[in-house]
Image: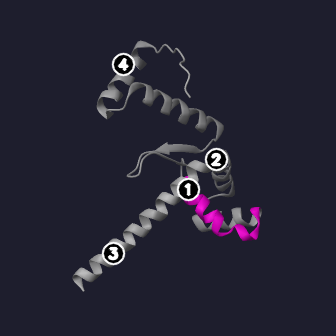
Amino acid sequence: MSRPISVRFPDELAERVRHHVVTTDEATSGLVVRLVDEGIRMAEHPGVVFRDGATGRRAGLASGPDIWEIITVVADYASGGVTRATARAAKHLALTEPQVRAAESYYASFPDEIDARIELNLAAAIDARRANATRSRLYG
């Protein structure tokens, strides 16, 4: 469900929004909703940013990898307990423990989003392996 909210933008900002909509072919309401949502998420989770990529926009650390990548590594070390998993993941990824905790915090707030991104990556890896096997058969 969605609820309308009336917002007035200063002229200069409204023009920038219009320009962005034209250049990206994104609906105005979709753009505003996305940017407000991402802005609030970044305010709630300092150090997290959003970036575009081949598979769409995703959350990542401002100075590091995507959140899904960090959570995948943390999960690999999960049997050692939370503190040890965080420390080992930080070392493995050359991040600080606070950076890994920031990713864990974001994941705690948006697990479905990150789990879906992990599944998307696993599917892409399977497709890449199949493509490589096919190429290997083709070229011997």
According to the image, label 3 marks what residue? 132
Label 3 to label 4: alpha-carbon separation: 47 Å
Q: Which amino acid does the dot numbered 3 rest on?
A: Asn
Image quarter (top left, top right, bottom left or bottom right) of the N terminus: top right
Q: Earlier in the sequence, mark 2 or mark 3?
A: 2
Which residue is at a point 71% across and 65% down the rendered structure image?
85
Q: On the image, numbered disc 1 is attached to which residue?
A: 68
Q: Residue 106 has which mark?
A: 2
Where is residue 120 drawn, in percent x and y? Answer: 47, 58
Residue 60 in view: yes
The magenta-colored residue range is 67-82
Q: Which of label 2 and label 3 is nearer to you?
A: 3
Which is closer to the viewer, label 3 or label 1? 3
* Residue at mark 1 to residue at mark 2: CA–CA distance: 10 Å
Secondary structure type for disc 4: helix
Q: Residue at (24%, 86%) from the top-left corner?
A: 140
Contact flag, marks 3 and 4 (Cβ < 8 Å): no
32 up-or-down from 48: above or below: above
Is 71 included in the stretch rendered in magenta?
yes
Q: Earlier in the sequence, mark 1 or mark 2?
A: 1
Instruction: Tell me the tag on residue 3.
Output: none
**In 3D space, how far apart are the residues under numbered discs 2 and 3 (Cα atoms)?**
34 Å
| Neighbours of disc 2 within 10 Å: few (<14), some (14-19), many (20+) | many
**Residue 32 on image: x %, y %:** 47, 27
Q: Circle 1 sits in a helix, a strand or a loop, which is it?
A: helix
Q: Residues within 10 Å of mark 4 (few under 14, many from 20)?
A: few
Task: Kindly indicate whether the residue at mark 3 contacts the one at mark 2 (C-beta within 8 angstroms).
Answer: no
Q: Secondary structure at mark 2?
A: helix
Residue type at tag 4: Glu
Q: Which residue is mark 4?
A: 15
